[in-house]
Amino acid sequence: MSCMGRTVFIGLDGVPHGLLKRLADDGTMPHCRRLFEIGNLHCIASTIPDISSVAWSSIITGKNPAEHGIFGFVDIPINTYRISFPNYLSLKSKPFWEKSEGRSVILNVPSTFPVREMNGVHISGFVSLDLERSVYPPGLLSQVKALDYKVDVDAEKAHVSMDMFLSDLDKTLTARGKVCDHLWQHEKWDTFMIVFTGTDRLMHFLWDAYEDEEHWYYKAFRGHFSKVDAIVGSIIDRLNDNDILVMCSDHGMEHLDKNVYVNAILKEHGFLHYDPALKGGFANIDGRTKAFSLDPARIYLNKRGKFPRGCVAPNDEEKIIEDICELFQRYAVGGKAVCKAIYRKKEIFHGPFIDLAPDIVLIGNEGINLHSGLTAENTSEETIFSGKHTQHDAFLYVRGRDKCPSVKEGFNVSNIIGYIDSLKAERWR
């Protein structure tokens, strides 16, 4: 162990600043409340787009998406209309643990599958296709299996029975806690990072239970956060005075009223031409298409030389972007604007991979979840989910009030690693 102290990094996927503070204040999360009395809790921004694959990639690298190369859970390689699924091998910037001289334990960080050789232990988070390629070193696999470890809760159970989903959620969390405890005690490390992702799943399905005290699952919602808090408490009770403790979320969350489908709107207004009844997805796009969308609400121009049936010439790009932005600025469902903000590529992305970035990114208005929905025939519909991501209201917490660098306006999750480095420099000067 370093004489300068260790670093412990706890992630609570999707947990908004406001919810965390409320649950700490009302006694649901007493260990977090204890922490907040001796540290600094900040409200920060997520990445754009505000999804876990992008945000956690920015958190662990300290880079903009156009620097680390992850823009979403799905992508379309240049010169194709084929859907690909970026993973850890697609990450073009090194995570902090590969640049650190010390030994690290990294547990359940999203979008870090498949694992690779490193100085320490790594168990990847969702989306992980199998446990065998989720554990490094391989010799640890049998111990992880013996503790009944699961990478993620089976969210499909929520579509069948919410009670089954909640039971699986708690079993997954219990096993994660056991593996966390095992690694903490039996591995040597300088940095320990664990991310809890069940919080995100819970809030997607039961945000309405958080807001409504009369909801059938009101107590179950808070009960899960209490169990997360108990594991957090077991971690902080083992910290030394000179250890750095950082907690954060990757994005916020708010209530969801309905899904709105970007490709259906583009099709409705003549920007996209395809037959949603045909199989093959984007392979059905024809040469009249000017633009199409990938989740979550990333719009790409169908450019000549970039896509097989691209029809947009360089001189036409700006006019088409203006027309699409104007469309979504005024587009409303039920009298409510669907977009809170609209960004062009160069407003939000910077780095060597900016050519792979979407030309436009839409941010949904409150209660509106913008999906691409290539096969959707309607522009909007109700959904089983009651919670949606937000770009604002993520959180950052640092234990200790002394020698903490200020969090400046515009701080977002990609600044966290740089902040931790500054914190170490201040504490150990």
Image (cartoon, rainbow, N blue to C red):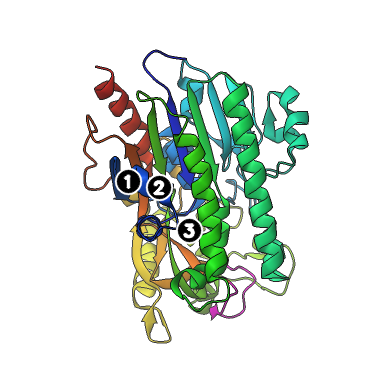
Q: How far apart are marks 2 and 3 (CA)?
A: 36 Å
What secondary structure is marked by label 2? helix
Instruction: Give the foreground label among 3 and 1.
Output: 1
Which residue is at a point 34% across and 49% down the rendered structure image?
A: 348
Mark 2 vs mark 3: give the one in front.
2
The secondary element bearing badge 3 is classed as strand
The count of marks equals: 3
Q: Do the residues labelled 1 and 2 touch (CB within 8 Å)?
A: yes
Residue positioned 64% across, 56% down in the render: 169
- Residue 218 position, x and y percent, is 52, 70
> Callout 2 environment at 10 Å: few (<14), some (14 to 19), or many (20+)?
many
Which mark, by number, is residue 32? 2
Quadrant in which the C terminus is drawn: top left
> Which residue does the numbered mark 1 point to in the structure image?
36
Vertical order, 101 against 401 (above or below): above
Q: Which mark is residue 252?
A: none
* Magenta region, main secondary structure: loop
Q: In this view, does 178 lie above or below 376?
A: above
Q: Label 3 near label 2: C-beta < 8 Å?
A: no
- What is the CA distance from the residue labelled 1 to the residue labelled 2? 6 Å
- Kindly tell me whether residue 79 is visible in this rendering: yes
Q: Position of residue 283 (x, y in %)?
A: 68, 60
Where residue 313 appears, as percent x and y from the top left, is: 45, 56
Q: Which quadrant of the figure has residue 392?
A: bottom left
Tell me the element at label 1: helix
Lower sequence index among marks 3 and 1: 1
Q: What residue type is labelled 3?
A: Arg
Looking at the picture, tell me which residue is in the foreground, 137 or 283.
Answer: 137
Which residue carries the number 3 mark? Answer: 298
Res 60 seen here: no
